[in-house]
Amino acid sequence: MTAFHSAPNEALIQQLHALLKSAPAGLSEYDVIQRLRANKSPFVPQEPLLDKLVLFRTHFILFNALYILRDRLWADASAHLEIHALRIQLQDYRRAKPGLIVADPLRSYYLDIEQLDTTTLEDVEALLESFWTRQNDEGGIKSALALLDLDESASYSAIRHRYRQLVSRNHPDRGGCTATLQSLNGAMEALRQRHQRNETEALSK
């Protein structure tokens, strides 16, 4: 059984950096886990991730290491690390505009290692059920669109088409990741609710 650590592990951070450097087009979270598993990494279970709590902990450890790596790359001004479940990619360094500070709640969450030790199975089930439905603000919608690799200009029909493509590609029956599928479903639900609100508002005018 995989041991879950409550502190950043340098070996995992270095493994992730090497994997991403070898894949300039980026990797999905599923691809990263599969490559770590193929390399017999002790940080991911060798068995299928069917248990929700084990899946959560594997995901959390991975994203904790990714956000630490991103911070280090930014500090060195050497690269930018794009972090999404469907695409994790090393990119050219982006110099921030003077005085521009953007809050990143996901970074804060994944760098809080206590979340790993205190989150229960009930917590995981609640998170999976409610995460996207709570994302009704502008930042949440942008996150949902980013997960689908779309921008604000995308029509609702384009959103639905892209969603169906990604669900087909990431379905567990085809070797995909359950967590990714649940994230796609949640993102689509948030975007569907926004579409319904927009239609209702248009009809009321």
Image: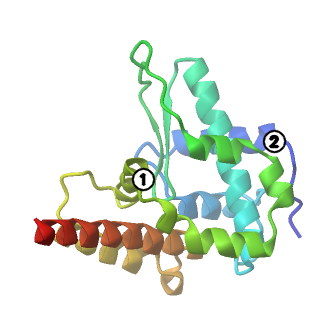
> Whole-percent x and y of residue 61?
74, 53
Circle 1 is placed at which residue position?
A: 143
Image quarter of residue 1: bottom right
Residue 121: % across, % down: 78, 74
Q: Which residue is mark 2?
A: 9
Image quadrant in which you'd find residue 47: bottom right
* Image-based side of 139 in relation to 177, left or right: left
* Residue 74 appearing in the image: yes
Q: Residue at x 70, y 63 (%)?
A: 37
Q: Nearer the viewer, residue 30 or 4?
A: 4
Residue 98 locus on image (x, y percent): 42, 12
CA neighbours of label 1 inside 10 A, class few (<14), some (14 to 19), many (20+): some
Quarter of the picture containing the C terminus is bottom left
**Against 160, is 92 above or below?**
above
In this view, the residue in front, 85 or 37, is: 85
Circle 2 sits in a helix, a strand or a loop, which is it?
Answer: loop
Residue at the spot 49% in from the left edge and 54% down from the top edge: 27
> Could you tell whether 8 is left or right of 108 in the image?
right
Mark before the other along the chain sequence, 2 or 1: 2
Circle 2: residue type: Asn
What amino acid is at disc 1?
Ser
Q: Position of residue 114 (x, y in %)?
A: 83, 49
